[in-house]
Each structure stands twice: as C-alpha cells, then as structure tokens.
Image (spheres, rainbow, N blue to C red):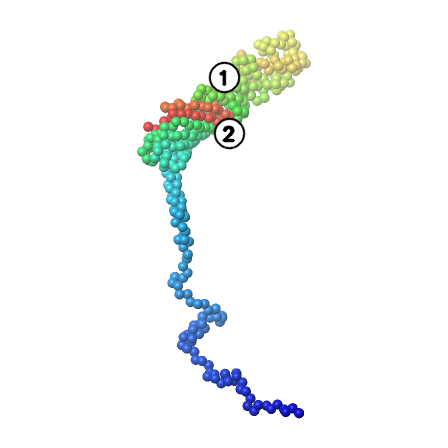
Amino acid sequence: MRTPHHTDAHPRPNPYEELAALDDGPLEETPLEEFRKESWESQGSEDGSEDAWAPPVHRRGGRRRKNRFAGLPFAVKAVVGLAVLAAFTALGDRWAVLYAEHRAADTLKDRLDLAAAPEVEIGGFPFLTQLADKRLDAVKVTVPDVAADRVSLAKVSATAHDIRLDADGLTSVRGAHVPRFEGDLVLSFADLNRELGASQVTFTGEGRDRVRARGTLPVAGHNLRLRAEARIQRQGERGIATEIGGMRLDIGDLATYRPGTRASEGLHLTPKGSADLARETRKAKALLSVPAIVQRMGVPEATVREALADDGKLAELTGSPRFARQAERLNLIDLALDNPEVLRRLGLDPALLDSLSGLTRPVLADRLSLAFELPKPEQGDVRLDDVRVEEDGIRVRVSGSGLKVGS
C-alpha cells in the first residue's frame, strides 16, 4: 500500500504577491510632467476633442523654399542670360523700326502732298545694323487714294530693294537712293462708279482686258439706257489707254442711238419699233407721207399711193419683212431737222434728237474713258509692265529703277 502524498505545511509564496508587496504607491509627478499635462489638456478643440500632439518646430521663419536656379550649372545660367539679353535687344530693334516707319510715312505724306499718311513696312533684321550700314534690305510703301487724271487709284503699293540711305543716325535721314522697285496700281470699279458714274453708270470686268459699262445717261430730259465696252491696253511705257466700243443709247424700246457716221450708226428703229409701226396705221401713214423717207426706203411711189389710199394695202406693205428691214435702216437723225412733226408722231422728241446729234463718239467716249498716265519722276525710270482686268478693278504692274527720294 502506497504511502499517501503529504501536503507541504509551508506552501511556496506567490511571486506576484511579493512584487505587490514591494509597491510603495503611485509615483509623484514632477513639475515638468505636470506642465506638459496641463498644456496638452488646454490644446483641446472647442467640441472637447483633443488634437494629436506634434513636436514643436524650432526653425525661424517657417519652412525655407528651395532655390532651384541656384542649383543650375553655370553654362545653363549663361544661356538663359543671353536669351534674356537677346529678347531685350530684339524689342529695342523693333521699337526703332516702328519709329522709323512712322517718320518715313509722315515725310512721304508731306513731300507727295497726300491726303493720308501711307503705310511703310521696313524689312530685314536687325534694323539697327542696317541703319548703321546706311542700307536697307527692303521697304514696302502702300499709298491709298492717289489722283490719276480723271480717276483715282484705290491703292498704290511698291516694294523697293537695296535702298541706300543718306542719313546721320535714326532721326536725321535726308534722303534715299532706290536702285530698283516693283509694285501694283489698283483702279477700283467702286471708285470708277463713284467718280465717273454721275449718270448712274456702273463698270464691271469682262475678260482679261475689257470693262463693261451699263447704266443710264440723261439727255435732253430723257434717261437713256447706256451700254458700252472699254478695252484696256498699255500706251507707251507709262500710259493706260481705253478704246470705247459698242456704244449705244436705247430710247425705250422704240429706237437705238449709236454715235458715228457709218450706215449702221446714228438713230434707228428697233425691231420692236418697226413692228409697232406696222400695227399702227397713223404712224405708218405719217412715215410714208414724207417723200424723202420713201425714197430712202426704196419703196415704189405707186405702191406708196395705193397704201395711203387703202388700209388693206397699207397693212400688207408695212407687215412685210422687207418693209421692216428698210424701216430699221433709216437714220432718223438725218430726218430730224426737216421732218420734226413726223418724228414726233413716231414718239420721238425733236429736242432729244437735236441733243443726240451733238453727242458724237468722241464726246461719249470721253465720258467713259479710264485712261491715265503715270507721272514721270525727276530722276530715275518708272515703267508699266502689265495691265489686267480683275473682278474688283483694273490692276497695273509697274517697275522702276534709279529713283531718288529726298535731297
């Protein structure tokens, strides 16, 4: 029989209880710890919550920004500096160009007696280097509204090359020598309609070298419908000539006047006018009652007597195609002075016919003439190279050499 296990009379002590016996109570807070605790408690938010604590920042002036430019290599800094210097130099050069263009425009306005200052554009870069060398690569001058004989040029534009200056600096340019230049002259149809269209005549382009004129022309109190055509061509080295052709004045649908002395010219009945004559017995008898008219038409006297005595014979005569052609060939201007009453019965005013007889081809052509001549310079040469009719007007190409401007 096993001997029962005896319990130890002095049990082993609990180690945690021994540690607890060594505790002297809570530690006392030092003054620094009490200050930190009070500081943390006073930094709470308005709703009672406390912000997270962060270590204090001891740098003066807050966070210092990093200077990126200070870290760049010297070569990069030099390139940037040169770029800035070049930009300021270019700006100064452009300012000098604008000043020179303004001075040149005012000078040209005064010396050419222009209504407005022209536009001046100086080409080439840099300008100050050219000025120091007293030579400009190119200068473009545009002058609006230049008088040219009876008409005005809407725009004169010329570009000069390799100009040599007579100057002492930017503000003392006395003159210039232009070895060569080329340019355009524009004769606007809008200006032509305003200046030559006092009688409500309008000009429009038709082909490369033709201009069509359409409108009305007052003659002896009657507004006659005008039609004409002008052919544009060069005349010599500096002139523009216009050959006026196809001129006609329509007196309603009754008659047409073409100035001139040929058989097809003068005042003639229109096909509608001759047809009306065949239908109106009174007009036909008035015409056939004049022997000179009958003789010119080539109608036999016996036929005329029968027609004047019998309306049926009259209608048969005047209704024939041969009579219509003969009536249209009559030049009524020749009959105006001797037979004014007959023409009045036809519906023509004798005063109008008198005025038409004085409206000759040269007189009418002068009213529609677009001719002009380029002025001859005191020194140098100006030539007219080409003339072309365009949609908005007449464009003339010019060139020149050896011009001198100023002293």
Please provide percent x and percent y for residue 201.
51, 25
Q: Residue at x 51, y 27 (%)?
A: 390
Please provide percent x and percent y for residue 294.
60, 10
First along the sequence among labels 2 and 1? 1
Quarter of the image for residue 128 reads top left
Q: Residue furthest front?
A: 1
Going by the numbered disc 2, the residue's amino acid type is Asp
The residue closer to the viewer here, 202 or 121, is 121
The residue closer to the viewer here, 234 or 334, is 234
Q: Is residue 282 visible?
A: no
Which disc is residue 392 wearing? 2
Please provide percent x and percent y for residue 175.
34, 30
Quarter containing the C terminus:
top left
Q: Which residue is mark 1?
A: 360
Say whether residue 77 is left or right of residue 215: left
Q: Against 70, is 394 above or below? A: above
Q: Secondary structure at mark 1?
A: loop
Q: Residue at x 40, y 75 (%)?
A: 32
Query: Callout 1 environment at 10 Å: few (<14), some (14 to 19), or many (20+)?
Result: some
Q: Which numbered disc, 2 or 1, marks the residue closer to the eye?
A: 2
Which disc is residue 214 wearing? none
3D distance between C-alphas at marks 2 and 1: 30 Å
Quarter of the image for residue 134 reads top left
Quarter containing the N terminus:
bottom right
Going by the numbered disc 1, the residue's amino acid type is Thr
Q: Is residue 12 visible?
A: yes
